[in-house]
Structures are given as structure tokens and as C-alpha cells.
Image: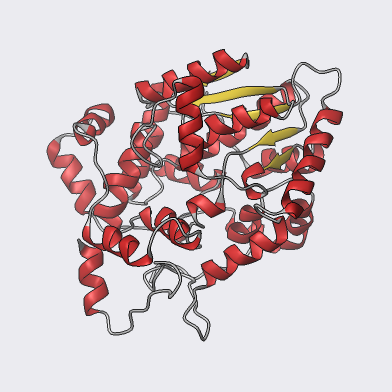
Amino acid sequence: MQATKKRSLDTNYKICTRCIYDTSLPSITFNEAGICSYCMMTESLIEEYGTGKEKGNIELKKIVGEIKAAGKNKKYDCIIGVSGGTDSSYLMHWAVMNGLRPLAVHYDNTFNTAIATQNITKITNKLKIDLFTHVVDNTEMDDIYRSFFYANVPEIDAASDLAVAEILYRVAFKFKIKYILEGHSFIEEGISPLGKNYFDGKYISSIHKLFGKKKIKTYPLMTFWRFMKWVVLVRIKKIRPFWYMDYTKEDAKILLSREYGWQDYGGHHLENRMNAFSHSVYFPQKFDIDYRNNTLSGKVRNGKMKREDAIKEYYETSPFIEEGLVDYIKKRMNFSDQEYEKIMSAKPKYWYEYPTYKKRFERLRPLFKILYKANLVPKSFYMKYCFPVSYIK
């Protein structure tokens, strides 16, 4: 792999003494003990949120009480975005076990695997959770995807990620629900490197205007002002329960399989074919980005994996690629073999080469600090979007 070659030849190469993050990541720094800034950031988050400790349990119980109070006399008291993956599936289980009345919301970008769709059905049916599904116009969505391929940037699935957020806000607003629960764990998934990837509504619309062929009519684009409406005017709160609790994917998978017949889909981000292609093929082969280091570093930090084993897996193995995945993407995107190879071999570009809202978010950092403290935006948004970052090295 290219990462192995890079590691052995770079005389300035440095790897964290605690996890497996290294100098290939932008914005990374190390203390005198050789511990990286991401490990120190994780420690800071554990302290702030009381993750897996009594402090976290107390705060989470308080939040659950607030959700119930805000949802009194309503059919639903919270929204959960579901994908069929481990985290969102377990979050539905946890919510019902804690007396919450969630509405499950699924954004179908038409790239779902059959297993993911079946998982959603199994859990919502058994827990008697209503499911709201937004299916995007696939021809319009495919045109947005193609425009990102032609732009030669890593974030080909960014439009889906942002659309999920926008749909969750819209459904919450429609049903007058004040809380959105998100299934993210910085303990399990690590912290995505700052600066290497980025997206917002302006980034998506600007790339599509340059390279797309169809007009955006049905795609739920989150503009800056729509975002501000949700978080400042409507004041819909986003809560990440796993940031407070002792949560492990391994335990969650066992419970989900036993109680609901849930099936594992093979790995993180693999429940959706475009997402799987991004992480297994596009990122590592075109950009030399292998996001397995996030999860592997998380496992090392929480003692579930030996550091030397994680390093070996990361540098000596390649990401799993589902059989037929590349051919499926080529066919779906209407790429000939020659066009696909041309895209994969073209010079990479990055988010800072196209228009974004990034500078605006940085200027509004004091406001977003207040908003994250009030759970109106996640702290990860504040950290990634509101501070200047080092770009690609």
C-alpha cells in the first residue's frame, strides 16, 4: 500500500505513541510524550461529557427528562435518523428502553444494501416505531454524485450526508419535535482528522453548478440560512447519547442480533454502496486516505485492540471491497471503463479550491460556541467548522 511506502521513506514521519494517527494527517500535533492532539482531544471530550462515568449518566438522565417534558402530549418526542447500521439501530433500542417515543427517519439515496433495509424494518417493527422515509429523485442525486467525481474531490457522498441532516430538521419541524438523537460515538469511531475533508451547502451547490447537468429541484439542500433557521430560530437540539454513555459496537451488535435478528453488513460505512465505495475504493486509491485509522485508533485508545495489531492491520492490509462494487458504481454513474480510469487517475483537488461557507463559520465562532453549549449544534461541528485548519500536506 502507498501508506506503507510513505511511512518507511519519510524522514519526518511520526506516529502517536498512544494511537495510530501519524503525520500524514493535517492539523496533527504531538506533546512531549509523543501523544497526538486527537488523543488529547478525546480525553478532553471524555472529561467534558463524562463519557461512561457517573457524570455522563446523570447528564444523560437529565436530557432524557427534558426530551420527555418537551414532547408531552405529542405523538413523538424525538427524531432518530436511521441507516440500518449498528449505531442508529442500537440508538432506537436505547431510546425505547428509556421511555422515549422516537420517530425514525430514513433518507434513501437509493444506494442502500438489502441488509440495511431489512435491519431498519426488523427493528422499527419490533419496537413499534413509526418510520418516515424520504426517497430522493435518483436521477437528480446521481447527477450530483457525478459532479463530485468530475470535481476530483474526496467528498463524493457529502451531498447525502448533508441531505440527511436537512431532512431530519425538516421532519422535526413538521412534527414540532425539538430533539434529534444522533448515533455517533467518538470513543468507538475516533475523531475524523480536521482539514482533510469538509462539506457544506455552498460547497455542494457550487460543485454541482460547475459540473452537473440537471437542476436541483427535489434534493434537500441545506443552505446557510436554512441551517441558521433550524438552530437559531426553531432551536432544534441535537443530542449524541453515546458521547455520555459506556457504548461499544461489539456489545450493540450482539444485542441487536439476539433481540431483533439484525444482521452485520461487514464493517463501518458499508451499509450503503456509495458510502462503501467512498471508504473502500475512492478515498484510498485516489487520495491515499484510509479512514480505518479512525476506528482502529479508537479501539487502541479504549483497550480493545493492541496498538501493534492496529498498526499492522492499517499498514499491511487493504480496506475490504465488496465483490462487484466497482462495476455497480460504474454502471450506476454511467461511466465507461475509460472514463472511470480517467477520473481515478486525475489530479486530486480539495474543498478549499471551491466556494464554501467555511470562512463565514469561522467569523461566527463565538455564536457557534454558544450554540454547541446549548446542544443546538454538535461540538464536533464547532471544532471542525469554526476554526482555521491546516490543509492537505
Q: In the rendering, at what x and y percent does residue 277 appear? A: 30, 40
Vertical position of residue 69 compared to residue 29: above or below: above
Could you say which quadrant of the image residue 247 lies in? top right
Residue 193, visible in the rendered structure = yes
Q: In the rendering, at what x and y percent does residue 391 appear? A: 45, 68
What colour scheme was applied to this rendering of the protein? secondary structure
Is residue 157 shown left or right of residue 161?
left
Is residue 85 shown left or right of residue 333?
right
Q: Residue at x 44, y 24 (%)?
A: 262
Could you say which quadrant of the image residue 11 lies in? bottom left
Extreme residue toward the left, this view: 338
Vertical position of residue 106 compared to residue 204: above or below: above
Quarter of the image with the C terminus in it: bottom left
Q: Residue at x 64, y 32 (%)?
A: 94
Residue 139 vs residue 254, the one in the foreground:
254
Residue 131 vs residue 91, the one in the foreground:
91
Quarter of the image with the N terminus in it: bottom left
Q: In the rendering, at what x and y percent does residue 216 appear? A: 49, 29
Q: How many marks?
A: 0
Residue 234 vs residue 41, the one in the foreground:
41
Residue 364, visible in the rendered structure = no
Could you say which quadrant of the image residue 45 lies in? bottom right
Q: Residue at x 56, y 18 (%)?
A: 124
Q: Residue at x 48, y 42 (%)?
A: 249
Vertical position of residue 36 compared to residue 2: above or below: below
